[in-house]
Amino acid sequence: MRDGALQRTILAIALPAMLTSVATALFGLADMWVIGRLGDAVAQGAVEVGAKLLMTLLIVFNFLRSSTVALTAQAAGRDVEAAQAEVLVRALVAAAAIGALLLLAMPVVIPAGLRMFSATGPLASLAQDYVAIRYWGGLPWLFNAVLTGWLIGRRRVRAVLVVEVAANLFHILLDLGLVLGLGLGVAGVAIATLSSEAAKLVALAAMAARERPARSAVAVVRARRTWDVGELGRLLRLNRDLFGRTLLLMTATVLLTRAGAQQGAVVLAANAILYQLFILSALLLDGFETAAQVLCGEALGAGRKAEFKRLVRAVLISAGVVALAIALVYALAGPRLAASFSTMPAVVATAHAYIGWAALLPLVGVASFVFDGVFIGSSWTRAMLLSMGWALAGFLVLLVVARPWGNHGVWLAFSLFFLLRGVGQAILLPGLVRRSFASLDPPPEGEDRSPRPCPAPG
């Protein structure tokens, strides 16, 4: 592909993926808005605590989506439909196993989680009601992660976006009907979320069933190759490394929050606003991470080294342009954006004082987001985990060194955390490319790795 065609291919995946990430993030806003119409602070607090408990529990299993994207894209690059079906079957079985363990742990997890969030009295009682209902949505959530990853790996990103938007609309209608219409309160919010997650599963399963590789899923369940120890071990290693990477990233986030809390409630609230602006930029740049996962996975699976290198450069350029645009918007409109998050003058003024860090973060973090996609798509998850560990160690040192600079020092350390990740991955990249393409085994009999058209984004 020429450069123009390459950029169009990247954007055809990145833009729908970007919108899907934003739509997913907005999923919980409907719950908070609807329950807020009741004017009951305890009910609103119960939904907040319950939702955070469940997302804390489930988000660490998002590796199911990432690993499925990578392995599916690599199989699609080799143009082997049976391998794509095997990836789907193995990932669904892994999701079912994790879901079963979570259900078995339910009597322990719910009370322990509520204690972790310091929920007591009426708040704890309502939060328990909410979690007891929504907890059953854990298994559909896990299956949805797999199906979403599998469809994205086959470039069906627009289809995933349609399902996500439809599920959000269905969720909002259920929230309005159950909470404001039938007066079910906290239980109504939980039922609406559980029902929309189940509906999303039905839609994604129906969409996956239309894909040709999925039609052979029943047959590959009985095939010995599907349960090959080496292939299963590969899946487990990918998921283990991605799980570890998520824990390290969550550790950095907790340390950022803790450093802000040590400076008082006003700084903590201001930092929360800046962090939300950072999350918004990360969601927008996440589309390019997804594009890198899919396209680099395909190129590696097909053994096309020159195309792989061009893709890495092209995704970095595209993401860099978007990061620059975000930084300019935050630099110009950041104070007004920050003011929309709070009505307290002290918090708004403090957020204004540090708004420059929200503008800087997309620029220093964009390379690490793209490289995450490249590393996941290429199954270099151990190297990604090591680079995350190195960056976290640097973050810990920087938090101590920059302490004399107060909150500016905290945000400097957090910004350098992402810069260290990107630098570490950039250093590792050439060696990983060289070894991965040099060690590609000859294709099995009947398998062709010559370039051929991949499924159109859809």
Image (cartoon, helix red, strand yellow):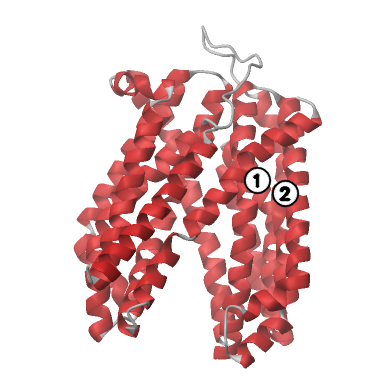
Q: Residues within 10 Å of mark 1 (few under 14, many from 20)?
A: many
Q: Which residue is mark 1?
A: 288
Residue 74 is left or right of residue 33, and the answer is right
- Give the position of the C terminus as an image quadrant: top right
Residue 165 in view in this figure: yes
Residue 441 percent coordinates (x, y): 59, 18
Pick the front one: 326 or 50: 326
Q: Is residue 173 left or right of residue 441?
A: left
Query: 10 Å neighbourhood of mark 2: few (<14), some, or many (≥20)?
Result: many
- Residue 312 in the image: above or below residue 369: above
* 198 is higher (above) or lower (below) than 246: above
Q: Is residue 92 left or right of residue 380?
A: left
Give, as a three-letter code, the residue at label 2: Ala
Name the residue: 50% across, 18% down.
80
**Image position of 378 with respect to 243: above or below:** above
Q: Which residue is mark 2?
A: 319
Mark with earlier residue (2, 1): 1
Whether tag 2 and tag 1 are in contact, CB under 8 A, the answer is yes
